[in-house]
Amino acid sequence: MMRMVDLIEKKRDGLELTKEEIRFIIKGYTKGDIPDYQISALAMAIFFQDMTTSERAELTMAMVESGDQIDLSAVQGVKVDKHSTGGVGDKTTIALAPLVAALGVPVAKMSGRGLGHTGGTIDKLEAIPGFSVEIDTKQFTELVNKNKLAVVGQTGNLTPADKKLYALRDVTATVNSIPLIASSIMSKKIASGADAIVLDVKTGSGAFMKELDQSKQLAEAMVEIGKNLGRETMAIISDMNQPLGRAIGNALEVKEAIQMLRGEGPEDLKELCLTLGSQMVFLAKQAISIEEARSKLEAVIANGEALEVLKTFITSQNGDASIVDNPDRLPSAKYLIEVTANETGTVSTIVADKIGTAAMLLGAGRATKDSTIDLAVGIVLNKKIGDSVKKGESLATLHSNSQEAQQVVEMVLAAYSISDQVVMKPTLIYEEIH
């Protein structure tokens, strides 16, 4: 008979847990037979002793099997899911999904609501008047088969073991463990029915992983888990030392995603979408190489097909697609407040987290689960790292529904550093892991 105390001791001493032992732990914890304090001890043992490649894969699969698994077999083609480890101004999905769908890649996306700087993908999409994510499984499948794209709110009981373990890691100082992060992310993607997975692992001041070598370890760990579980997986490591694009805030980010599909958006957002999109198109077998995938994606931006897919997607989920041609019909804030530079020079740093917190204070995000989001508000950065600025020139514009925004102005100002030296624009994509 297995005893949890023996398994904690085994891991504490750096030995490998078997498939049966990992299943016993996750099943017992999900049912409530194994108490929090024993799982806390195990998490700390994993934190210090790490896990082997096969342990990581078994832990991921045990968490997948702890709850519902979405069956996407009725969706034709290779279903490729994209996951970002998060950051500030990350509106990639809204531009990327129609972009790859325009090349026949089925995007069956389950997204959550956001807790933090801005809303999640679902909140952002709900800035579009009438847009609904409340669609049943049958309708979801039909829309993906017909339009190659649908987005639905997370339903059912996906990976309950991960939810329990995640909450526990948060209060036991074991969040920052590569095997625990990697299995947490990959379990959700696999339970969501993906055939192949593309990962955007952020690195830098505004990312979960601040150091490049840690981000690389995480990306490699997730690609390895995917491979072990029969899912083709690719990853990139991208920069989050400043917000992505210029817009932070729900309607503002939708507007920027539309601009990108017109070929007009910020260069970093476009580059990230093309890099991730190339991997998705390649894994979905709609191109024979990453290079061919990229040129096909550039073509559907240039000829307007990606924009048409976005319109069809919005209309199919009861949204007002006229916002694509008239983005001013999206919710807009009452007041525009300029944050101006105190000196002349070149922008050397923008602390992404501070900008994110500032956007949340305006009402763009949730401080708690029960907070209400103001879809209209946010921040648009007029200057990014490497841009020159004159004293009195606008660094950023606050979109606010309150005139009382002095605290936010000061926070945005504090996020910027201006240098009298030449500053290079930061690298956007550090590495691609295949």
Image (spheres, helix red, strand yellow):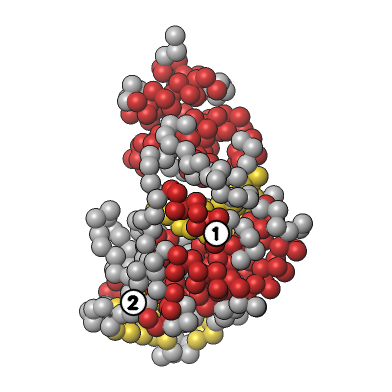
Q: Position of residue 361 (x, y in %)?
A: 29, 68
Residue 331: which disc? 2
| SS class, disc 1 | helix
Q: Position of residue 234 (x, y in %)?
A: 64, 50
Visible residue check, residue 4: yes
| SS class, disc 2 | loop
Which residue sits at x=45%, y=68%? 314
391 relative to 266, above or below: below
Q: Position of residue 189 (x, y in %)?
A: 51, 45
Residues under numbered marks 1 and 2 in contact, where contact means CB atoms less than 8 Å apart: no
215 relative to 32, above or below: below
Residue 361 or 426: which is nearer the viewer?
Answer: 361
Q: Position of residue 352 (x, y in %)?
A: 45, 66
Q: Quadrant of residue 253?
A: bottom left
Between the residue at mark 1 and the residue at mark 2, the CA separation in whole angstroms equals: 29 Å
40 relative to 140, above or below: above
Q: Quadrant of residue 249?
A: bottom left
In the rendered structure, which amino acid carries the disc numbered 2? Pro
Which residue sits at x=61%, y=73%? 305
In the rendered structure, which amino acid carries the disc numbered 1? Lys
- Disc 1: which residue: 146
Residue 209 or 377: which is nearer the viewer?
Answer: 377
Mark sitting earlier along the chain (1/2): 1
The N terminus: image quadrant: top left
Residue 398 or 291: which is nearer the viewer?
Answer: 291
Which residue sits at x=41%, y=90%? 392
